[in-house]
Amino acid sequence: MPARELISGRRYLGALAFLASLACAVEPALAFYPKKGDSAPHHGVRDARRKVIQGIDVSRWQGDIDWAKVKDAGTRFAFIKATEGGDHVDPNFKRNWIEAKKHGVPRGAYHFVWWCRPAKDQVRWIKKHIPRDPDALPPVLDVEWQNDSQCARRVSREDALEKIQIMLKGLREHTGKKPIIYTDINFHEDVLEGAFNDHPYWLRSTAAPLAKRYARDRWEFWQFTTTGRVPGIAGHVDRNAFFGSEREFDAWRQGRFDIGSRTWHGGPRVAIRTPPPTPAGLRAPKAAGGTRLRFVPPGRIPSRTADNRDIGTTGSLRRD
């Protein structure tokens, strides 16, 4: 190669190296789960990708899942669709429930609320089809408007809260665990703001930080993309992040830590240490790539204003 071309090539390679290092500085946590991806990543949810504990939610739309590959990709939890309304069971629920446990993926069941059915009917359906496995994650109640279904009417806020209360109580009585509330931006604003604040919340935002979408100062799970790619699953899958430490996650699974009220009970308190400013040597789990961690201290989420609301950003766990 002529000298001029050699020098030009070196400059080109140097520029590429610089850009690569810059990209790593901006998105250091992408390497936490190198086997996972996103076919349409959004810069607005980069904070979710920095969370060490991440999982998925699935239904029949993910087809036959290879749970061994899902586990190998570093999946820490999975929420699996079980029931909907008072007469529908996800056809893949039983298989997903068994296979996830077989391959060591902590899993919980979720019920999609159907506003055209009485709450008591839905509780009876839940109790009939959702297992009472002692090692399962707490169940999820999926509450959102059904704009694209045969049940598109909107009940009043008072009626919605009453139905939710009945179903939360039924889920807790059935499983012995405090349920998680999943919701989207519009339903949270219309119905849930200020309600059930002692319950864990699982919020959806696929294009912006939760701080810009919800009038809440706390959240436990974040559904940050619906176009995720995970080995073992053909096509897209929802990806989620847990807000909390490893110790909080383990203690929550054991029933010693309430992630909704942030209180400890049922045994000796587990000390939570704030990560040092420069956590040299700390690494992500091996299943997540063993990458050196960069911690971002949690902060309180400020109230949303009319200026940062985006009513077009909404979505659903349900795809039937």
Image (cartoon, rainbow, N blue to C red):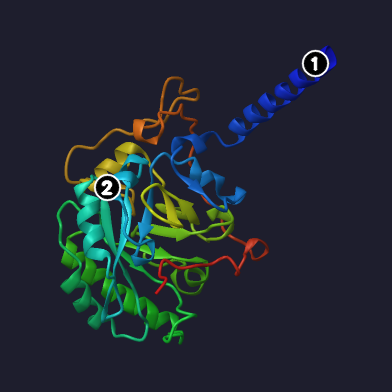
> How far across and how far down the image is residue 315, in percent?
50, 67
Label 2 to label 1, Cα distance in Å? 52 Å
| Circle 2 Cα neighbour tier, 10 Å, few/some/many (<14 / 14–19 / ≥20) | many
Q: In the image, 17: left or right of 100?
A: right
According to the picture, the residue beneath numbered tag 2 turns out to be 105
Q: Residue extending furthest right? A: 4
Residue 104 vs 204, above or below: the answer is above
- Residue 264: in sight, yes or no? no
> How far across and how far down the image is residue 48, in percent?
49, 46
Residue 254 vs 17, above or below: the answer is below
Q: Residue at x 60, y 69 (%)?
A: 312
According to the picture, the residue beneath numbered tag 1 turns out to be 7
- Viewer-proximal residue, 111 or 213? 111
Kind of element beneath mark 2: loop
Name which residue type carries label 2: Val
Residue 84 vs 71, above or below: the answer is below
Query: In the image, which is nearer the foreground, mark 2 or mark 1?
Result: 1
> How far across and how far down the image is residue 262, in percent?
33, 48
